[in-house]
Amino acid sequence: MIDSHLHDRLGRRVTLRPVDDDNWRAVADVAPRDDQRAWVPALAARYLLLTDRTDVWTSLAVYADETVVGHVMWGVDDDGSRWIGGMLVDAAEQDHGVGRAAVATLAQWLAGEGGGNPVRLSYHPDNAVAARLYTSLGFAPTGATEDDEIVVELVTLA
């Protein structure tokens, strides 16, 4: 379990846990709001398949207390940089700070595990909500793009 002792605005402790035999169905069923479908898949199941079929990504279940509320994945690039990807918070669980706590928790963990290598992620330039979130957490644009997305790097832990 990855735990930064962060809570959402409802007071629930947000942790990241391995996807396993007990929680994979709940993770697979995580679905964003319809207005977010331009940036993420309809279900987290797509991300689970990606992590199952490649050696690049590792999926994690996002928990609020003991309830699965989301998915996030991480990977290591050829240059040693740590990447956060595949972030989904279930539509019913949004606007409570779960995503913020999950990204902050994973970024802190990756920074600590990375041996000084940068922590990066990318988002679509039209996704203003993501841009505000990542900027507020200490990520800054690198000037690079990845698949038409803006690449940002953790500069400071917020």
Image (cartoon, rainbow, N blue to C red):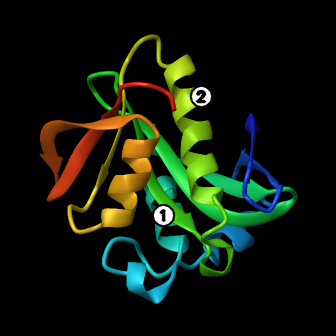
Check disc 1: other Cα within 10 Å, few if <14, some if 14-19, many if 20+.
many
Instruction: Tell me what residue is drawn at x 45 percent, y 58 percent.
Output: 86
Instruction: Tell me what residue is drawn at x 63 percent, y 48 percent.
Output: 101
In the rendered structure, the answer to whether residue 53 lies left or right of residue 140 reads: right
The relative height of residue 80 versus residue 131 in the rendered view (above or below) is above
Judging by the rendered image, the residue that carries numbered circle 1 is: 47
Query: Can residue 54 be seen in this snapshot?
Result: no
**Residue depth check, mark 2 versus mark 1: number of the one nearer the observer:** 2
Picture coordinates of residue 116, whole percent (x, y)? 42, 12
In the rendered structure, the answer to whether residue 114 lies left or right of residue 148 reads: right
Pick whichever, 135 or 70, lies toward us: 135
Residue 38 found in image quarter:
bottom left
Picture coordinates of residue 24, whole percent (x, y)? 71, 65
Residue 71 found in image quarter:
bottom right
Residue extending farthest bottom? 34
SS under mark 2: helix
Q: Which of the two discs, 2 and 1, labels the residue nearer the N terminus?
A: 1
Residue extending farthest top? 115
Q: At label 1, which amino acid type do we have?
A: Tyr
Pick whichever, 155 or 56, lies toward us: 155
SS under mark 1: helix
Q: At label 2, which amino acid type do we have?
A: Trp
Picture coordinates of residue 84, whole percent (x, y)? 44, 44
Name the disc covering residue 67, or none: none
Q: CA distance from mark 2 to mark 1?
A: 21 Å
Pick whichever, 59 or 100, lies toward us: 100
Instruction: Tell me what residue is drawn at x 61 percent, y 49 percent.
Output: 102
Quarter of the image with the N terminus is top right
Picture coordinates of residue 18, whole percent (x, y)? 70, 47
Judging by the rendered image, the residue that carries numbered circle 2 is: 109
